[in-house]
Amino acid sequence: MKSIRKPKQRNYGKSKIKIKDKNITFRKSSLVLDASKINFSHKDKKKCIILPSKLTPLLAEEMGMHLGDGFLSASKYDYRLKGHKLDEKWYYVDYIRHMYKQLYNIDVKLKNYSDTIGFEIYSKALWEFKVCVLGINPGRKDDICLPEIIKVNDEDILRRFIRGFFDTDGSVYFMDTNGTGNFYPRLSITQKSKQIIDDLGNIFRMLGFSPKVYHYKTESHVILYGYSQLKHYENEIGWSSPKHLKKVRRWKEMFTVAMV
């Protein structure tokens, strides 16, 4: 009788990259925000806009979203946040819309543009708060850096800031390495600013990751490779965006089938 050849077993989910102990090197501990000198326009008062008095994890996440996909005009009191019309629709409908209501008491009106979905907010108070209190520079983001207000010795703040940044400007990709079916995980953020990529890499290291940072002529990248870092990201930071959650869930389903 001809012997039946057993399929070759593969080791899935193993990673040479080790997760390190967390070590937050930022010294500042105060989370108090002073918005007492912010000017409210007549429309701001009529809309009953509020401004946070403390740096909370939710506000840190919103700041990450702003630096990822937002734009603050340098010529008028205009703030915009827009994402992919299809991939991020429910992220805006089910999550972001409620976030701005909770943080600022703003009822954002979502609009569908040619290939994006998002909103624009005209508010003197919000603009001044972002610039004067949060320390976010208006205008082009080619040379953005980590706002000083985020540099606190607080893991929750740093985790949620990364989540907001990644959800709006990051990507989850699974590489079929050499056709082996391993589908090796890669999490990455790409920006024009070298400094913000260095800053993000620094935060990732504080949280126990081993990021790779690459600088090229027109853009820079911070990348997390491997199964262990994907798992650590999922446990420590996570996603609010259904786009990323769906992609990871589908990979897990495929991963399980491959192991059977």
Image (tube, rainbow, N blue to C red):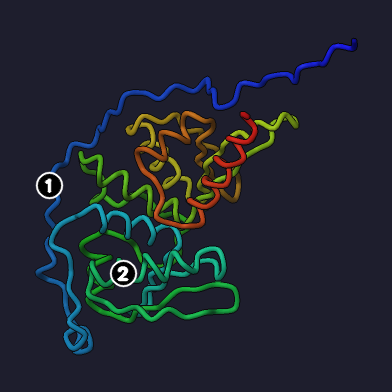
The local secondary structure at tag 2 comes to helix
Q: Residues within 10 Å of mark 1 (few under 14, many from 20)?
A: few
**What residue does disc 1 label?**
30
Labels 1 and 2: the sequence-earlier one: 1
Q: Does any portion of residue 234 appear in the rendered image?
A: yes
Q: In screen coordinates, is 231 left or right of 99?
A: right
Toward the viewer: 15 or 217?
A: 15
Badge 1 amino acid = Ser
Find residue 221 and report its horizontal and vertical position in percent.
53, 43
Q: Quadrant of residue 235?
A: top left
Q: Which residue in the rendered view is the most extreme toward the front?
A: 1
Badge 2 amino acid = His
Q: Quadrant of residue 21?
A: top left
User: What residue sits 42% from the left and 47% below the top?
Assistant: 196
Q: In screen coordinates, is 139 left or right of 220?
A: left
Q: Does any portion of residue 215 appear in the rendered image?
A: no
The local secondary structure at tag 1 comes to loop
**What residue does disc 2 label?**
98
- Classify 85 as above or below 28: below
Quadrant occupied by the N terminus: top right
Q: Quadrant of residue 120?
A: bottom left
Q: Nearer the viewer, mark 1 or mark 2?
A: 2
Find residue 125 and report its horizontal and vertical position in percent.
22, 76
User: What residue sits 47% from the left and 57% below the top?
Assistant: 242
Find residue 71 and report its horizontal and vertical position in percent.
42, 68
User: What residue sits 32% from the left and 44% below the top?
Assistant: 159
